[in-house]
Image (spheres, rainbow, N blue to C red):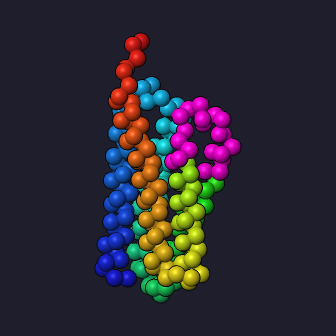
Amino acid sequence: MTDNDVATLLSFAAAAIALAGFSSLVTSIDRRRVGVGHEVISLRIRSLISIAFSLVLLAFLPIILEGFVIEIDLLWAISCAAGIAFFLPMLAVQVTHQFQRSKLDQQGFSWSLYWTNVSLTFFGSGIAASGIFDLIPARGAYFLVLLSGLAIVFAFFHRIVVMVDEGARVEPHSD
């Protein structure tokens, strides 16, 4: 593995940590003002933080595997397999949201965010599988897996920022 590979992996980890850290600002929102149910806000925050944490672990995986003196092509293929293991549970969670559609619609659930994440999940899974079966170089596939995971984190982060902005524009309720 080259120094550039390590730097790229650490950059993915740093970006995921930064987005997760900034999401903590959401806890200071007056949730009554944003027009979104508590469950949806909690879902977004939990999803963002858990996906970001998983990305950090995935970013460190090839570096750790290299310490076991694994042949480089196998190292990247194993990393791609871990990428699939990362995306499949996300896909399962997203499918369960489809079954709760009416309940979530009443709480301000963003279906555009949902379909963005489903698309990125399928893309990441397909790229990871292509890397495992050597249809594309596994090293490049793994970087795309991390990039699609980071795009999901960014999509959640963006939606949270938009939600905060919308909440700031609403007149406070008088209790």
Q: At which x and y percent is residue 55?
A: 44, 61
Residue lying at the far bottom in this picture: please name it.
71
Instruction: Residue at 53%, 66% (x, y): give it.
Output: 124
Residue lying at the far right in this picture: please name it.
99
Task: Tell me if residue 127 comes above or below residue 43 in the rendering.
Answer: below
Task: Tell me if residue 36 comes above or below residue 68 in the rendering.
Answer: above
User: Is residue 51 in sight in this rendering?
Assistant: yes
Task: Tell me if residue 65 comes above or below residue 147 in the rendering.
Answer: below
> Does the magenta segment cover residue 40?
no
**Quarter of the picture holding the N terminus:** bottom left
Instruction: Residue at 56%, 32% (x, y): give it.
Output: 107
User: Is residue 61 in sight in this rendering?
Assistant: no
Is 26 on the left-hand or right-hand side of 102? left
Is 9 on the left-hand or right-hand side of 145? left
- Examine the image and state in which quarter residue 91 appears: bottom right
Q: At which x and y percent is residue 64?
A: 42, 74
Q: Which residues are magenta?
A: 94-113
**Quarter of the picture holding the C terminus:** top left
- Examine the image and state in which quarter residue 166 appears: top left
Residue lying at the far top in this picture: please name it.
175
Is 39 on the left-hand or right-hand side of 2? right
Q: Nearer the viewer, residue 156 or 77?
A: 156
- Examine the image and state in which quarter residue 27 appears: top left
